Amino acid sequence: MRTDHQREQGATAGGAPGHGVTAVAHPNIALIKYWGKRDERLMIPYVDSLSMTLDIFPTTTTVRLAPGAPADSLTLDGSPAEGEVRRRVVGFLDLLRERSGRSEPAVVDTHNSVPTGAGLASSASGFAALALAGAAAYGLDPDRTALSRLARRGSASASRSIFGGFAVCHAGRGTGAAADLGSYAEPVPVPDFDPALVIAVVDAGAKAVSSRAAMRRTVETSPLYRAWATSGKTDLAEMRVALRRGDLDAVGEIAERNALGMHATMLTARPAVRYLSPATVAVLDGVLRLRSDGVPAYATMDAGPNVKVLCHPADADRVAEAVRGAAPGCSVFTARRGPGARLTGEAER
Ligand code: ADP
Ligand code: DP6
Ligand code: CO
C-alpha cells in the first residue's frame, strides 16, 4: 500500500491526481551580495554570493498535477496570482515539464510568511519551495546540487535557500550548458558561528522596481558596477576567513561594506534605483550609535528599505530596542540561522 509519506516524497513519480507535494523553504540574507546577471535566460549571476538562511518567515508551497486542467493555476497567499508573478511560475513549471518529459498543467498553492517583494527575500524562499515541491510532483529526483541549480532558474537567490545555515552561490564560468552547470549553491560549514540577525521591517510594501529589473538597469548603466563586482571577490575571500574564525566584527564589517557598495551601484544607475528610505537611514544611524556604545552591530540591506542587523545573540534584545527607537513604528524580528528546504514529512537537512 502507498502511504501518505511516500506520496509526499513523490516516490511514485508524482502525477497522482488529488494529492499534492508540499515543500517548505526559508528566505536567506546575503552577507556577500549577488546583483546582476550575465545570462538572463539561464539566470547566471555575474558574481559569487554568500548568505545565511533564516529560521523565520518560511514559504510553504504545494504543487499538484492537474492532467485535465486547461492551464496552470497559481494562488499566492490565498488569492489567484496574475501578471508577472504568474508568468515567472509558469515559466518555471515549463522548465520542469521539459526536464521530466511530461505535459500536465499544475495547481500551485503558495503561502509566504515574509512580505512579498519587500527586499526580505520572498523570491528566494518562494522558488526554493517551488523547485523542491515541483520537481517531486513531476517525478524528478534531483540531488541537492541539481536542485540548487534548478531553483536558480526561478530566482538566483533561491539557489542558496535550498541549504540551511551559510551557503555560497558560485557564479560559474563560460556560457550555455557550462555556465548552467557551474552556477549552484553549496553549504559553507561554519559550526562555531551562530549570530543573530535583527530585522527591521520599516515598510512591508512591495518594491516599485523588482530586483530583476533593477539589477538589469544597474549592469547596463552604472559606471560603478564593475568596480563593485571586482571588490566583491576580495570581500568573499575575506568573508570566508572571518566566518571560519567566528569573528563577528570582521563578518559584519565586510557584509556592511559589500551591501553599501551594491546600493552605490544602484544609486549610480541611470535612472537611479533607490530602495533606501529615510527610515532605512535612521536605522543605519541607530546601528552606528550602537557601535559607538560598544555593541557590535552591522547592517545589510537588499532590494528594499528594510534593514538586517547582524549581532551577537546576547545583544539581540538591545539591538532590537535601538532599532525600534530609531524608526518608531517599524516591526522587528530576530532570526538565527535556519534549515534548508524540505518536503513536509521529510527530516531536516
Ligand atoms: P524579494 O525581495 O521579495 O525577493 P523580488 O523582486 O526578488 O523581491 O521578487 C519578488 C517576486 O518573487 C514576486 O513578485 C513573485 O514574482 C516572486 N515570488 C515571491 N514569493 C513567491 C512564491 N511564494 N512563489 C512564487 N513566486 C514568488
Ligand atoms: C539584493 O534573486 O531576488 O537580494 O534572480 O531576478 O529573482 P532574481 O533576483 P533576486 O536578487 C537578489 C538580490 C539581493 C542580493 C542577494 O540576495 O544576493
Ligand atoms: Co528576491
Image (tube, rainbow, N blue to C red):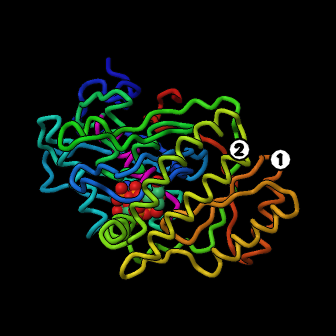
Where's residue 84, x and y in %? 27, 67
Query: Please, what is the dominant secondary structure of the magenta stretch?
Result: helix
Q: Is mark 1 on a helix, strand or loop?
A: helix
Given residues 100 and 9, the one toward you in this image is: 100
Residue at 69% over, 47% down: 250
Q: Can the viewer see residue 122?
A: no
- Say above or below: 205 vs 15: below
Q: Can the viewer see residue 217?
A: yes
Where's residue 19, x and y in %? 31, 39
Quarter of the figure with residue 75: bottom left
According to the picture, the residue beneath numbered tag 1 turns out to be: 314
Residue at 30% over, 29% down: 142
Where's residue 299, x and y in %? 66, 61
Left or right of 108? Residue 59 is right
- Say above or below: 213 vs 226: below
Q: Which label was assigned to residue 195?
A: 2
Q: State the extent of the magenta-drawn residues as a range.
A: 119-135
Q: How crowded is mark 2: few (under 14 residues within 10 Å), some or many (20 or more)?
A: some
Gap in Å between the C-alphas at discs 1 and 2? 9 Å
Quarter of the figure with residue 55: top right
Q: Does the residue labelled 1 lie within 8 Å of ligand 2?
A: no
